Structures are given as C-alpha cells and as structure tokens.
Image (tube, rainbow, N blue to C red):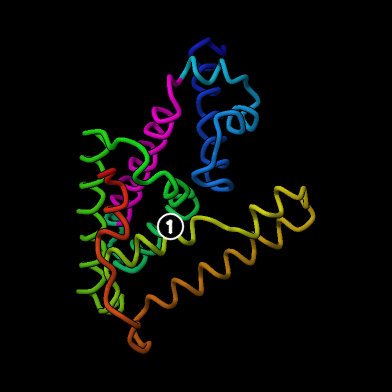
Amino acid sequence: MTTRKDIAERNDRTLLQAARDVLAEDGAHASVAAIATRAGVGIGSLYRRYKTKEELFQRLSLLSLDHWNEAAEQGLADPDPWAGLAAFIHSCVAFGQGSLAPVAGTIEVTQEMGAKARRGDELLDELVQRAHQAGVLRKDVTAVDISLLIEQLGRSPVVDQLRKQGRGDLLAAAAEARRRLIAIALDGLRPGHGPLPGSPPGEELFTGRWSSE
C-alpha cells in the first residue's frame, strides 16, 4: 500500500531530477519556475519542500557527493584496478555528476558538503594511485584530470539540444554517439599514448571553484 511518505519521497525524487536536468540545460541561469515546470509542480509546492533555491542546490550537491563516494567505494572493491576506475567513471557520468558545476561559488558549502567532498577526494586519489601502481593508467593522468573528465562527459550538449527540440527520433542515435565518445575518452587514459600537453590542472579548477571568497 502506498503511503503519504512514499508519495512525498517520490515527488521529492521527481523534483530533484527536474532540478538536475534544468541545471544541465540552463546552467547558472536555471530558474525555480523552470524546475517546477519540469517537475510538474507549482512553485509553491517547491518552496514548501525547499525554502530557497540555494537549499535545493545544496541538497542536490549532497546527493551528488553521496553518489560519487558510493561509486568510488564500489570501484575500490573491484579487484581489477582498471575495471574499478572505469566503472567509477561510467557511474558518475551516467549520474550526470558534472551538472552542478554551474552553481560552483554561488552557494554556501555546508560542513556536511565539505566533509563528503574531502572523503570523495581521498577515495578518488586511492583509485588513481591503485591504477597507476598496476600500470593500467597513464602516469601523467591525475585525480583532477579524472574529475574534470567526468564533469565534461557528464553533460551531452547534443542530447540536451535534441530534447529541447522535441526530436525524440534522434535521441537513441545521440545516446549511442555519446557512449562511443565516452569509450574513446576512457581509452585515452590507458598507457601507450604520447604525453599530455601543458601542466597537470590544479585543485582550483575543480574544488576551488566552490569557494565563494
């Protein structure tokens, strides 16, 4: 039997997914009105659940961090260092992990967010170090490289554009093309390629953006 709690949780999941989708499409310009419309609820209903847009985005951030950490732990549980790292990347990309990048520096980072982010950094460092030690990840790839790669692959401009245009006839082909690009990118992480250009990216390009100072 479906309870009120079940309905509330289902509505909350719908709302959070709508917020993630609108952020992926509209970036920092994502509006509460657009999120409510995508979720099929009124703005009043949204504000009854989340008092401010910042609170909504903070909740999204926590869910994203939870997924990142769970995916990393599952990757580390795989005895195969490459399979574990690749599964982590695939999981984060499928989740749309980079969709929150546009709000970096625009919302307060809570203590809970900070603690989970630090744990995520530790887990990814462990995944990368393990892959390096096994010789399955090119030596010049860093944890920040992996983080930025996930952010880039987590969004698909073609898929987003086709959805806005209502071109459902092309979505399957776009999804297949995206899977090919992800496979190409992952192959580029393997040893046997020429050196990467420039210096390794610093933390400021990924976590540093979340500071509002």
Residue, x 44% and y 52% (percent of image)?
A: 98
Does residue 162 appear left or right of residue 208 in this picture? right
Quadrant (top left/top right/bottom left/bottom right) for the C terminus? top left
- Of helix, strand and loop, which one carries label 1? helix
Q: Quadrant of residue 100?
A: top left
Q: Residues within 10 Å of mark 1 (few under 14, many from 20)?
A: many
Q: Is residue 104 above or below residue 31?
A: below
Does residue 209 appear left or right of residue 178 in this picture? left
Residue 116's spot in the image, x, y percent?
25, 41
Q: Look at the image and say whether residue 70 sits in the magenta stretch.
A: yes
Residue, x 51% and y 74% (percent of image)?
A: 184
Looking at the rendered structure, the number of numbered marks drawn on it comes to 1
Residue, x 31% and y 52% (percent of image)?
A: 209
64 vs 132, nearest the viewer: 64
Q: Look at the image and say whether residue 65 sits in the magenta stretch.
A: yes
Residue holding disc 1: 151
Q: What type is the residue that disc 1 sits on?
A: Glu
Magenta residues span 50-75
Secondary structure character of the magenta stretch overall:
helix
Quadrant (top left/top right/bottom left/bottom right) for the N terminus? top right
Residue, x 28% and y 37% (percent of image)?
A: 109
Residue reaching furthest to the front: 213
Does residue 154 appear left or right of residue 160 in this picture? left
Residue 86's spot in the image, x, y percent?
39, 64
